[in-house]
Amino acid sequence: ENTHPHSAMVLDIESFRQQEDPDALGPEGVRQIQRDRFKPVEVVDDIITADEKWRQARFNADKLNQAKNTCNTAVRNKMKAKEDVGDADAGVPESVTSALVEVTAETCAALTVNQLKKLSKLLDA
């Protein structure tokens, strides 16, 4: 038996997420554990909110990585095809920079190599 005064029960983050499996703990099960331990139930909601924010941030980061890979592939293809690199001073259109997570191969096809390189740097930031 653990008699440490600050011992804590460790739960997998999956326990805080709504589960399809009826036998899974789920958010209400974690809340019940808190009630049974006379601990604040609000902590469960705080963890769920933080997890949802983290999952959305992770999703956006994955989309940005995907956009960067798409952009880099377009640069390689355009260089291989010996396309003109375009004006060095040309910026990336605002319609593209305002929706970075939505960059597609079609978006990249419309840009010059120089614009794609600038876009790639934006995606790194």
Image (cartoon, rainbow, N blue to C red):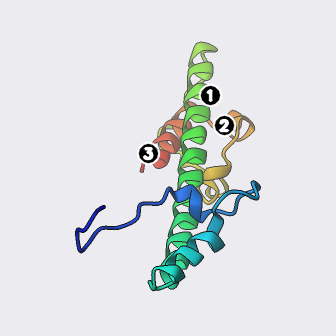
Query: Which mark is nearer the camera, 2 or 3?
Result: 3
Residue at 58% from the left image edge and 35% from the top image edge: 71
When the figure is inspected, residue 55 is found, relative to residue 34, above or below; the finding is: above
Q: Nearer the viewer, mark 3 or mark 1?
A: 3
Label 3's element? helix
Above or below, comparing residue 12 to residue 42 in the picture: above
Measure how far apart labels 2 and 1 are at the Cα level.
6 Å
Residue drawn where x is 54% and y is 45% of the image: 90
Name the quadrant containing residue 7: bottom left
Q: Classify mark 1: helix, strand or loop.
A: helix
68 with respect to 7 (left or right): right
Question: Which residue does the image show at 57% across and 77% down from the upper left?
Answer: 31
State if disc 1 and disc 2 touch (CB < 8 Å).
yes
Mark 2 / mark 1, whichever is N-terminal: 1
Type of amino acid at the residue the image marks with label 3: Asp
Label annotation for residue 108? 2
Q: Are marks 3 and 1 in contact (CB under 8 Å)?
A: no
Instruction: Identify residue type, mark 2.
Output: Cys
Q: Which disc, if any, is residue 124?
A: 3
Q: Quadrant of the N terminus?
A: bottom left
Q: Is residue 118 above or below residue 69?
A: below
**How far from the left and from the top, in percent, is residue 70?**
62, 33
Q: Which residue is mark 1?
A: 74
Under mark 1, the amino acid is Ala
Using the image as rendered, state which of residue 69 and residue 50 is in the foreground: 50
Q: Give the spatial CA distance, label 3 vs label 1.
A: 16 Å
| Callout 2 secondary element | helix
